[in-house]
Amino acid sequence: MTGEPQPLPPRPLPPRGPHPLAMHVAVDSAVAFLAILVLGLIWSLSIGVIIAIALLTGIGLAPWTHRTEVRQLADRRRTDDDALDPGEDATT
């Protein structure tokens, strides 16, 4: 023992619900747009076609990314609950 105080463990993040599906569509579409922009321009695709492909990709991926977020938030809640001492309640 060195007598130095042990650092406190980080506090768990506050619980929250998943983001709405529309937000997943917007973010997934933006990521898809940026991912295909360079190749689309190299292949001489018009910007409208690139946007359409990005929107279709975002719409297709949004349910999957939403389910993934729901699962991860549930795992986080379960991990946070397991980290609490038996005599401690979740509100402190």
Image (tube, helix red, strand yellow):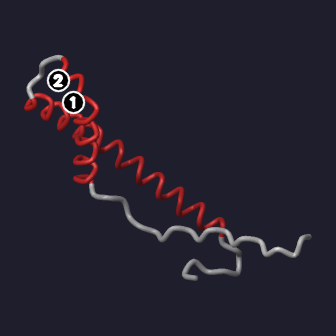
Q: Nearer the viewer, residue 37 or 77?
A: 37
Residue lying farthest to the top in this orientation: 43
Amino acid tagged 2: Leu
Q: Quadrant of residue 54?
A: top left
Q: Nearer the viewer, residue 55 or 77?
A: 55
Contact (Cβ within 8 Å) of mark 1 with mark 2: yes
Residue lying farthest to the right in this orientation: 1
In the rendered image, which quarter contains the N terminus? bottom right
Q: Which of 50 and 78 is in front in this view?
A: 50
Picture coordinates of residue 7, whole percent (x, y) = 72, 71
C-alpha distance separating marks 1 and 2 = 6 Å
User: Mark number for residue 37?
Assistant: 1
Identify the residue shown where x is 41% and y is 67%: 16
In the rendered image, which quarter contains the C terminus? bottom right
Residue pointed to by mark 2? 41
Identify the residue shown where x is 23% and y is 41%: 29
Amino acid tagged 1: Leu
- Look at the picture and state if 71 lies above or below 13: above
Secondary structure beneath label 2:
helix
Identify the residue shown where x is 30% and y is 44%: 63
Secondary structure beneath label 1:
helix
Q: Residues within 10 Å of mark 1 (few under 14, many from 20)?
A: some
